[in-house]
Amino acid sequence: MIDQFGRTVRGLRVSLTQRCNLNCIYCHHEGEGGISSEMTRDEVLRIIRVAKSLGVGRVKYTGGEPLLRRDLPEIISGTIAMGMEDVAITTNGTLLEERARELWDAGLRRLNVSMPSIRPCVYASLTKGALAEVFAGIKVAKDLGIDIKINVVIMKGINDDEVDELVGYAKEIGGSLQLIELEDLNLDPEFFRRHYFDLTAVEGRLDTMADRVEARSDMNNRKRYIMGSLAVEVVRPANSTHFCANCTRLRVTSDGKLKPCLMRSDNLVDVLGPMRAGCSDGEIRRLFEGATRLREPYYRQAS
Ligand code: SAM
């Protein structure tokens, strides 16, 4: 599937639920609105199977909190069984201690843990959760052999002074680190105005700390700073024509709609409705092709 801007769709980001056991003050909810119906396991796997037949090789499960789905291990093992090259989840990590084993047994080998602060009080004020649970979950997952990437949205006056500590923690657990610029989506405008933090200075600092810097051609050409065994990535989507020009991802909302762009909700393509009305795989393929035609870079050079 190649869109009108020459961008091939290589990955799906699938939201499995909008339910969450945390309440992060900065959360963009993956660009989704309120609570709605959820796809069943079989519906998720059918959508993925059709996407695979169209050349998609990567799947990331998100939410809400994907670990709230009891059937997550079956969804993961079903996805892996189709021969997807890369299957991962993004989680807040609070339920990992009890569930990491099931995920490992299902075949999961890679996950992202969102940890917006390494300081318990700051973490609690941002998420209403307990950082100790996240640390415990990371330890269990890491001991099993799952690769961990720590995701941190950096916010001015909240956690912008934690970068060195986060680098130290990621090194200590043998994981990697992803620093993310705050996106203005589903947020209180005043919160965004006060806490948006431009990561240019952080990139400069990482430059001086890194042994070398790479660009990930598979992921929006984002920069990766290599420091010994640690890789630190910086994700800067805000106002970035470069980020959008290199986007290879299509989204699926928790209620089964193809979402061509995180930032837009006016061009969704419903798949769950047609599936529940008995449509064929060929029709689902056409819905995917239609959604691909609707893909446009959200930020682009004025022509
Ligand atoms: N509950 C899961 C978790 O915590 O990872 C999945 C949902 S969360 C919305 C998915 C990712 O979005 C996390 O990595 C989080 O850091 C990121 N995120 C949430 N709000 C954001 C925002 N306003 N700007 C940038 N990234 C954001």
Image (cartoon, rainbow, N blue to C red):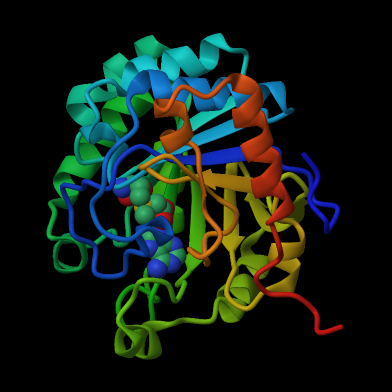
Q: Residue at x 23, y 43 (%)?
A: 134
Q: Is residue 135 above or below residue 151?
A: above
The residue located at (42%, 39%) in the rendering is 256
Relative image position of residue 143 (x, y in whole percent): 34, 22
**Apparent side of residue 166 relative to residue 291 in the rendered image (left or right):** left
Q: Residue placed at 66% from the left, 23% from the top?
A: 282
User: In this figure, what is the number of numbered marks?
Assistant: 0
Q: Is residue 295 left or right of residue 174?
A: right
Q: Nearer the viewer, residue 238 or 303?
A: 303
Image quadrant where one finds the N terminus: top right
Report whether 75 appears left or right of 244: left
Is residue 245 or residue 127 the one in the foreground?
245
Residue 302 drawn above or below residue 185: below
Query: Residue at 68% across / 56% down in the picture?
Result: 294
**Residue 165: x, y in percent?**
38, 61
Vertical relation: 42 (above or below) 272: above
Residue nearest the viewer, comparing 95 with 173: 95
Q: Position of residue 39 (x, y in %)?
A: 34, 32
Image quadrant where residue 62 sits: top left
- Residue 100, located in which quarter of the rendered image? top left
Residue 85, visible in the rendered structure: no
Question: Which residue occupies the extreme front position in the image?
Answer: 277
Q: Is residue 197 visible?
A: yes
The image quadrant where one finds ligand 1 is bottom left
Task: Tell me: residue 84, above or below residue 232.
Answer: above
Q: Quadrant of the C terminus?
A: bottom right
Residue 176, image x and y in percent?
51, 44
